[in-house]
Amino acid sequence: MTEPKPLSSAQTSGPDQEPANGEASGNVAAPVESRRARHDSSHEISTRAAASVLGAPAGVQALVLTGSSKGTSKVVGGRLTIGKAADNDLVITDDTVSRHHCEIIRAPDGLHVRDLDSTNGTKIDGTRIREAMVQPGSVLRVGEVEIQFKPTTQRVEVLPSDKSSFGPAIGQSLAMRTIFGILERIAPTDATVLLEGETGTGKDVLARALSAGSHRSSKPFLIVDCGAVTYSLIESELFGHERGSFTGAVATRQGAFELADGGTVFLDEIGELPLDVQPKLLRVLETREFRRVGGNKTLQTNVRVIAATKRDLQREVAGGKFREDLYFRLAVVPVTVPPLRARRDDIPALVNHILKLAGGNDLAVPPETMQALAAHDWPGNVRELRNVLERAIYMAQATGSKEIGVVTLPTGHAAADAAFHFEPDKSYRETRAKYDAEFEKRYVKWLLGRHTGNISAAAREAKMDRKHLHDMAKKHGLRGNEAEDS
Ligand SMILES: Nc1ncnc2c1ncn2[C@@H]1O[C@H](COP(=O)(O)OP(=O)(O)OP(=O)(O)O)[C@@H](O)[C@H]1O
Ligand SMILES: [Mg+2]
């Protein structure tokens, strides 16, 4: 089973505290006893980038960047001694390091470093010091060895939920129960949640369940579909506009952040948000203040934000299509909902759940039908499963059958439909070229498959030139079982 990557554990520290190059080694993470983590008050849930939001305490660790002990790290407690001798807290055996080289004292005002009369000295930013303060992120040079001080990533293992549902969302698989475990704890907080996952995996259901499980449940839950709203209106949709601020703005209008005050704003398809609107969203997330389009009054808003996307937002960030700062603001609690094919043990429970909802409660599901359903790959995920079942219920009812019969599962054709994924910044020509090539490949594969690789027979059936088919097969790495000139 595929486990969703950010979920098995959650970490404190984010862009606010993390120095630019900082990946903490896992062994420095201080495990928090999980039972405590489950029962303590919600603010102690610590997730990636969440420290500032959730108030989780961040420790400091010393990480050796160079020399023979490179990669070693130690959490700085009250005092940390560094040197070559074995009785130091952080032992570094490089030649340029003295036996008792320096010490770090953690005081309420920050980290103090004191050189212990070392031979080669202790330096901060190139300056030799006897005693000084070190800032998180700064690098200390102990002899020739570099040591960086940075906030610890504190791991809090969130255990999978004991329940196989979270609000209306059903799931028995470990992957889903892990998500439920996190969402149960995060729901009552105001933490921003980013839901990632393929189409139909249940991001919408989970967003609603989160809102329903919060103290904002009686307040508005407003959805802004950033992919559906036209470019020119998205800002107005989010922040509202003043009368006359643009052509067509005949009346003043309130946006989602104003209308949802006290409640939740669900930013669906956040990956589609235009780059130039992203800073405006970032501002409202940071300050909880905004202005209507064309307005000059700053308005306050008290909303909880949940965002969802089918895209891999980190990849979008890497590709310059999504702002990194906004990504981190949104991904306070990142949750990746795995595709249904990666959690097949959810299928039987989902089948029963959907049957009940769709009025097929009294219909039996024969084992072979259930097996077929569980074996299918479901490119459209739970939505596709629901569609197939609703059709099957209808068929059973129409024929007076007492069971869900042979379900016609979508073929590769439907899978190909689901695989269409248009990218807004690609031209028609580029998009077409990509899908033409994909079409060609799938077609040739299918055609040759029908004729067990016999190119002549395949070409005859498709009324194509045999050489052309042969070239196409070759181009796509598909092999016909005849030589071209046979
Ligand atoms: N875990 C689940 N339990 C019950 N129903 C589910 C679950 N996941 C999805 N569904 C159902 O499947 C359908 C699709 O789910 P949903 O709309 O939440 O998907 P989505 O991830 O938002 O998809 P998209 O990216 O296309 O918007 C809905 O009818 C929803 O009720
Ligand atoms: Mg959705």
Image: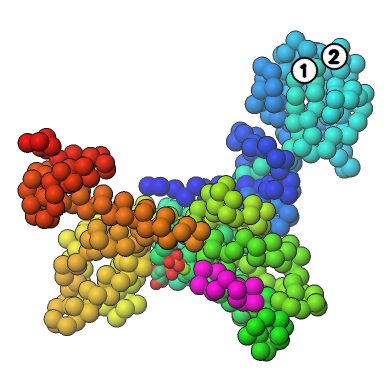
What range is drawn magenta here? 226-238
Query: Is residue 39 among what the camera can see?
Result: no
Number of residues whose C-alpha sits closer than 10 Å to that of mark 2, classed few (under 14), some (14–19) or many (20 or more):
some
Report which quarter residue 173 is drawn in.
bottom left
Looking at this view, name the residue that lies furthest to the bottom. 251
Placement of 339 over or under 120, stated as above or below: below
Inspect the image, locate mark 1, and give the three-letter code of the amino acid beneath it: Glu
In the rendered structure, which amino acid carries the disc numbered 2? Asn
Number of residue marks? 2
Secondary structure that dominates the magenta span: helix
Q: CA distance from mark 2 to mark 1?
A: 8 Å
Q: Is residue 34 left or right of residue 76?
A: left
Question: Which of pointers 2 and 1 lies earlier in the amino acid sequence?
Answer: 2
Name the residue nearer the viewer: 85 or 127.
127
Residue 387's x, y, as percent? 30, 72
Give the x, y percent position of residue 353: 34, 71
Q: Looking at the image, which residue is at 16% across and 70% down?
A: 405
The residue singled out by tag 1 in the image is 144
Q: Which residue is mark 2?
A: 120
Q: Residue at x 89, y 25 (%)?
A: 127
Nearest to the observer: residue 392 or residue 268: 268
Q: Where residue 275 sits in the image (x, y, percent)?
A: 62, 60
